[in-house]
Amino acid sequence: MLDHRDRLDRLFHALADGTRRDVVERLVRGPASVSELASAHAMTLQAVMQHVKVLETCGLVRTEKVGRVRTCALRPEGLRLAEDWLSARRTGWERRLDRLGELLEPDS
Amino acid sequence: MLDHRDRLDRLFHALADGTRRDVVERLVRGPASVSELASAHAMTLQAVMQHVKVLETCGLVRTEKVGRVRTCALRPEGLRLAEDWLSARRTGWERRLDRLGELLEPDS
């Protein structure tokens, strides 16, 4: 079981690659097989599988194999974890600006 | 000038390190000198400078040197770029779920 810090490390690492972000964008529209992902990105099955593995390890994607077909689906809770970290920092920053504003213009 | 895709690569790479996220969290509360960051994280000045460099290159931090003191400040537009990418994917996913719901229960 990964702790929160390790999960964020892996999530942001997974998202730091344009091809992996493209796979996430494709899966937003619904599940896809590994071969569909490969043909959409003009990549070998092996190259796609490596990216899918990274996305699976960090919790952004789950896969299921039925017969010879491995299907990938998005796990939106992974996106949410990364988004929550960023939005908490942004709101922290905005609160600080509000407090500065109040200090500079106490009567407004 | 980096294009949008390269900027996202660098932003998510920068955020994939817990120490760099700690630096961002610290700078949400206001600017800090490199030596303040070093003492807060029990790191050498050199190690902090390496992290600050990564944060500066991706546009999350700006630094200014006055005399012997280099001060770091957050650039919130970097946080927003990464957050916007994630929230667009999440809302795309939610819209898809809504459409699925309408297809499954057309009268509700």
Image: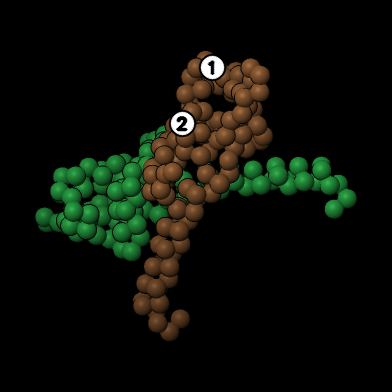
Chain colours: A green, B brown
Indicate the amino acid at tag 1.
Leu
Residue B54, which numbered label?
Answer: 2
As drawn, is A49 to the left or to the right of B88?
left
Q: Position of residue A35 (x, y in %)?
A: 16, 56
Q: Which amino acid, by three-letter code, is at mark 2?
A: Val
The x, y position of residue B101, in whole percent, is 40, 73
Closer to the camera in the image, A77 or B22: B22
The dot on residue A39 is none
What residue is drawn where x is 49% and y is 54%?
B84
Q: Are marks 2 and 1 in contact (CB under 8 Å)?
A: no
Q: Residues within 10 Å of mark 1 (few under 14, many from 20)?
A: some
Q: Is residue A102 visible?
A: yes
Residue A71 appears in view: no
Residue furthest to the right in view is A107
- Residue A93: image location, x then y, percent: 64, 43
Q: Which residue is mark 1?
A: B45
Q: Residue furthest top?
A: B44
The count of marks equals: 2
